[in-house]
Amino acid sequence: MTTDSPSYSPGLEGVPICESALSLVEGEAGRLTYRGYSIEDLTLPEATFEQTVALLFDGELPNESRLSEMKNILRENRILDPEIVELIRQIAKKTHPMFAMQAGIAMLGPKDNDFEIKVGSIRQRSLSLVAKVATVVGVIAQSLEDRPYEGPRESESHAEMLLRMITGNETHPDGHVHTMDSLLTLQADHSAGNASTFTSRVVTSTKAEPEAVVSSAIGALSGPAHGGANEASLRLFIEIGDPDNAEQEIGKKLDDKFKIPGFGHRVYSVKDPRSKVIQRIADQIIQAGSKNDDYYKIALSVESVATERLGDRGLFPNVDLFSGCVFAAIGIPIDLFTPIFVAGRTLGWVANMEEQWASGNRIYRPTQIYTGEAHRPYSNIAQRD
Ligand SMILES: CC(C)(COP(=O)(O)OP(=O)(O)OC[C@H]1O[C@@H](n2cnc3c(N)ncnc32)[C@H](O)[C@@H]1OP(=O)(O)O)[C@@H](O)C(=O)NCCC(=O)NCCS
């Protein structure tokens, strides 16, 4: 059959939404690269989140002096106005941290609202947001636990600051800071087609201020089909409780057509490469015999049962099957898993924003296929049945 109308692709599957040189997801090969570098290499022991920030913005890995410059830029931009800190602390007591994140970032916006005339400052505004988003996560964490505000410190790296503000601990076991660096890097970008980055592109295309771009993207990330799956997977493991019950419980859930959080992906038809890196970290930092070790064992059972049932349909673990166990193992409360995802992904959102402006920034205005009534005559209310 031929038709004059374009065909509709639910979920825009297979529809390119932009050109991008930032990151590449190769679904069949199970590969994720930023500017051509593999996520496996970008999470090696010497690698930091600051390096990933420099790579995504500059297009090249930083040398020592550029890396130190990037560390300073993030440090200088982390500080929040005390009034904003207080407002975020109050909001955090009333809503889920993801809504507090959205509100907190929106509050960082300027009093005027015409970004086109300020677009020359886009790099500065982008880096400022990457820096401040992490502080906002820390402020929310401190408020939730009724701890006083203890802001960013001069000596800390980005990951160190996040870990201290969230956990309240002054020192961290071996490997925990590097785990935070790796989690931020693994979540930093995932091609422009993921729902939140697509959102950041759409909002950018309206010439909105960067804070509006990031707070909108946070809303998109909050859903359980996207960022919220890391929380949902750990909650599922807590519900299952005992690794010995995992096989049977997951089998029952699959019989009931339950969607296993942390499983399946629109683009990957093999195991998500991020989940392999997270497992490498899990093997290093989860203590044998701990509660988190039980959850990790449950996650492994979920992988094995669900892969046996769904693997022939190209469904395998995604980043969120094991990430919750690792977040928990470094002391992150469950409600803060997705906010940390925000702290990493803000980098991808603002790098996409910058790329979008550089490419001409034409407003997104796709079409629809109308399925409603044809034109019909209006009748006034007295004449209606
Ligand atoms: C990621 C996800 C949203 C992709 O969605 P999608 O490409 O639109 O795929 P669909 O939801 O249409 O799923 C296609 C089929 O696979 C099944 N499926 C997909 N993910 C599944 C899962 N996690 N558990 C069980 N079945 C799943 C669906 O039920 C559907 O089956 P059907 O054809 O019999 O109806 C989806 O796999 C999902 O909801 N996963 C769980 C949430 C998650 O982990 N999100 C984080 C992504 S990084």
Image: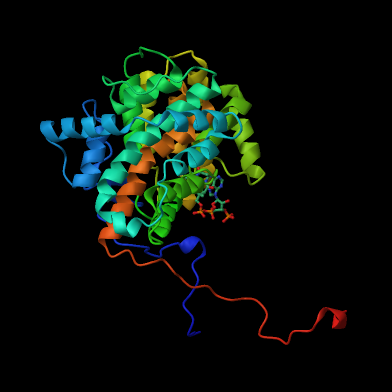
Q: Quadrant of the C terminus?
A: bottom right
Q: Does any portion of residue 301 appear in the rendered image?
A: no
Residue at the (52%, 24%) spot, across then down: 143
Q: As displayed, is residue 374 above or below residue 296?
A: below
Q: Is 306 on the left-hand or right-hand side of 351?
A: right
Q: As displayed, is residue 288 above or below residue 296?
A: above
User: Where in the figure is residue 211, as x and y percent of width and height?
Assistant: 41, 46
Query: Which residue ends up furthest to the front in the rendered image?
Result: 111
Out of 232 and 208, give the one closest to the viewer.
208
**Quadrant of res 21:** bottom left
- Counting every numbered tag in the picture gives 0
Q: Does any portion of residue 368 appear in the rendered image?
A: yes
Q: As displayed, is residue 315 above or below residue 287?
A: below
Q: Is 347 on the left-hand or right-hand side of 203?
A: left
Colour mapping used in the image: rainbow
Query: Which residue ends up furthest to the bottom in the rendered image?
Result: 377
Q: Is 134 on the left-hand or right-hand side of 227?
A: left
User: Where in the figure is residue 270, as x and y percent of width and height?
Assistant: 39, 46
Residue at the (26%, 44%) spot, across then down: 124
User: Where in the figure is residue 352, as x and y percent of width and height?
Assistant: 32, 52
Q: As displayed, is residue 380 above or below residue 180?
A: below
Out of 147 and 234, give the one closest to the viewer.
147
Out of 220 and 112, give the one closest to the viewer.
112
User: Where in the figure is residue 12, as x and y percent of width and height?
Assistant: 46, 63
Residue at the (56%, 41%) spot, across then down: 260
